[in-house]
Amino acid sequence: DTGVSQDPRHKITKRGQNVTFRCDPISEHNRLYWYRQTLGQGPEFLTYFQNEAQLEKSRLLSDRFSAERPKGSFSTLEIQRTEQGDSAMYLCASSLGGPVSTDTQYFGPGTRLTVL
Amino acid sequence: AQSVTQLDSQVPVFEEAPVELRCNYSSSVSVYLFWYVQYPNQGLQLLLKYLSGSTLVESINGFEAEFNKSQTSFHLRKPSVHISDTAEYFCAVTDRDYGQNFVFGPGTRLSVLP
């Protein structure tokens, strides 16, 4: 399967711990997006990369959150000093390129984070 | 800034019945509109999108949506649903000129009953 993959699928952690999630996009895709989805809500945009450059960050992305895409391939999302409010599904998506607003995004299965 | 409203959080319907999932958006600029579907235990998949041209767009599995600018709506319809259509459906909007920030609605859970 050559779709977007995310690891781990589930993560349970204690408040105050750091967690890191990984996303592997579809291999030829230049853009990579991170979203957060809480229960009963649609995905909320967090940040997006064009190759290795992080081009936009939502105000939802506090200083405790950092994302990287060092070689323009996989990406990591780290949350430091986790809080219970960080509990959510973290979604990754990738897209091929072209005009951003019409570029079809392909989503991974998500990483479900539970902060105790 | 854009926003999306999906008034129906859950829609139960019997197999082979028609269905309409409502989506209304708010924006001060021109937008593109999308419907995504999330089947159980799977990632979101693009169902259909409106970019320009004909206001009626169709998907390969029988869904259609019509862009209505005056009513700021993009309702999703299917004349006859199948059990396999059971999923969560998300409407999304993006700014035509500055579009990487997709804004999603809260979703509608469609349950098709036998």
Image (spheres, coloured by chain):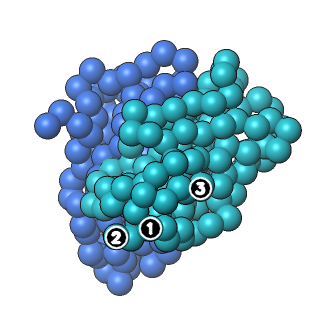
Compare marks 3 and 2 and give the one earlier in the sequence: 3
User: How far apart are labels 1 and 2 at the CA level?
Assistant: 6 Å
Q: Residue at x 23, y 60 (%)?
A: A9
Pointers 1 and 2 in contact (C-beta within 8 Å): yes
Which residue, given by chain and number where applicable, does mark 1 sit on?
Answer: B14
Compare marks 1 and 2 and give the one earlier in the sequence: 1
Rendered position, A114 above or below B51: below
Q: Which mark is residue B21?
A: 3
The label nearer to you, 3 versus 2, is 2
Q: Is residue B102 left or right of residue A67?
A: right
Q: Quadrant of residue B38?
A: bottom left
Query: Which structural element holds mark 2?
Result: loop
Q: Is residue A33 visible?
A: no
Label 2: chain letter: B
Residue B14 at what x, y percent from top left?
Answer: 44, 67
User: How far apart are labels 1 and 3 at the CA level?
Assistant: 14 Å
Rendered position, A29 above or below B42: above
Between A56 and B104, the residue placed more toward the observer is B104
Q: In which quarter of the image is residue A21?
A: bottom left
Q: Residue at x 28, y 35 (%)?
A: A25
Colour representing chain B: cyan
Compare marks 1 and 3 and give the one earlier in the sequence: 1
Colour representing chain A: blue
Residue found farthest to the bottom: A116
The label nearer to you, 1 versus 3, is 1
Q: Residue at x 65, y 55 (%)?
A: B22
